[in-house]
Image (tube, rainbow, N blue to C red):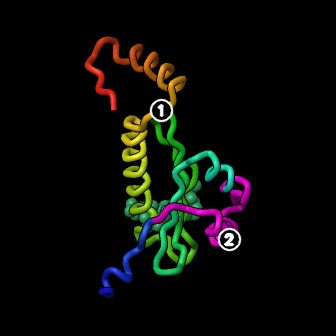
């Protein structure tokens, strides 16, 4: 692997196994850190949770809640020793991109019959006759 690729931070989905590292950062940088339960709840709720890694080192993470085509950034943090180097700005761009991609994917995700009818009704109200593409 080239040195450039090896040294590039990499974004990956957050898993429960990552939470020890995440909580260590939380406790180091916040006076009122999120608890393990907060992160577990976020993962269980299907929020978009990502970790930023450099090799095996956790540099930062974000938790993004997407609802009704709106994204709410609930947590974005960079480890103490890595702040003020542009990583937070980069991670914020990643979160925005994740929000756009997830919202687009959800618009195209097959849904159950009951959810589909509720969505169809809502879509009909919103679109008010405009062309609707079902996917
Ligand atoms: C806030 C945080 C996410 C920013 O990430 P970062 O990697 O340190 O920030 P960047 O190097 O990408 O800098 C982005 C901008 O934020 C500014 N900035 C970063 N940390 C700052 C701070 N503590 N106070 C004021 N401005 C700050 C930088 O000056 C920079 O602005 P500029 O480009 O106009 O100079 C990170 O420092 C962090 O996790 N801090 C502790 C927790 C926190 O305060 N989180 C935010 C509230 S939830």
Can residue 32 be seen?
Answer: no
Q: Position of residue 70 (x, y in %)?
A: 46, 36
Q: Which of 35 and 132 is in front in this view?
A: 132
Q: Which residue is drawn at 27% across and 16% down?
A: 130
Q: Which residue is drawn at 51% across and 25% down?
A: 113
Residue 120 relative to residue 29: left or right: left
Q: Which of 93 and 56 is in front in this view?
A: 56
> Is 22 part of what is drawn in magenta?
yes
Residue 92 relative to residue 33: left or right: left
Give the residue pinned by disc 2: 20
Is label 1 or label 2 in front?
A: 1
Question: Which comes sooner in the sequence, label 1 or label 2?
Answer: 2
Q: How many marks?
A: 2
Give the residue pinned by disc 1: 111
Specify the quadrant that holds the N terminus.
bottom left
Residue 68 relative to residue 127: left or right: right
Q: In this view, does 19 lie above or below 7?
A: above
Region rendered in magenta: 12-39
Q: Which residue is drawn at 34% across and 12% down?
A: 128
Can residue 106 be seen?
Answer: yes
Q: Main secondary structure of the magenta part?
A: helix
Question: Quarter-wise, where is residue 6 in the image?
Answer: bottom left
Question: Quarter-wise, where is residue 31 in the image?
Answer: bottom right
Q: Where is residue 115 in the image (x, y as percent from the top left)?
A: 52, 26
Tell me the distance, in whole angstroms, between the alpha carbons under discs 1 and 2.
Answer: 35 Å
Q: Where is residue 20 in the image (x, y as percent from the top left)?
A: 68, 71
Describe the element under mark 1 as helix, strand or loop: loop
Whether residues under marks 1 and 2 lie with C-beta atoms below 8 angstroms apart, the answer is no
Describe the element under mark 2 as helix, strand or loop: helix
Specify the quadrant that holds the C terminus.
top left
Neighbours of disc 1 within 10 Å: few (<14), some (14-19), many (20+): few
Q: Residue at x 57, y 54 (%)?
A: 75
């Amino acid at each position: 692997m080239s040195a450039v690729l090896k040294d590039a931070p990499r974004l990956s989905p957050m898993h429960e196994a990552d939470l020890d590292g995440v909580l260590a950062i939380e406790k180091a940088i916040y006076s009122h850190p999120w608890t393990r339960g907060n992160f577990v709840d976020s993962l269980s709720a299907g929020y978009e949770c990502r970790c930023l890694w450099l090799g095996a080192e956790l540099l930062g993470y974000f938790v993004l809640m997407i609802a009704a085509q709106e994204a709410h950034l609930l947590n974005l943090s960079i480890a103490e020793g890595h702040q003020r180097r542009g990583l937070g700005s980069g991670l914020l761009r990643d979160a925005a991109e994740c929000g756009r991609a997830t919202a687009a994917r959800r618009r195209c995700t097959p849904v159950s019959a009951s959810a589909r009818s509720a969505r169809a009704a809502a879509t009909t109200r919103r679109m008010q006759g405009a062309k609707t593409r079902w996917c």
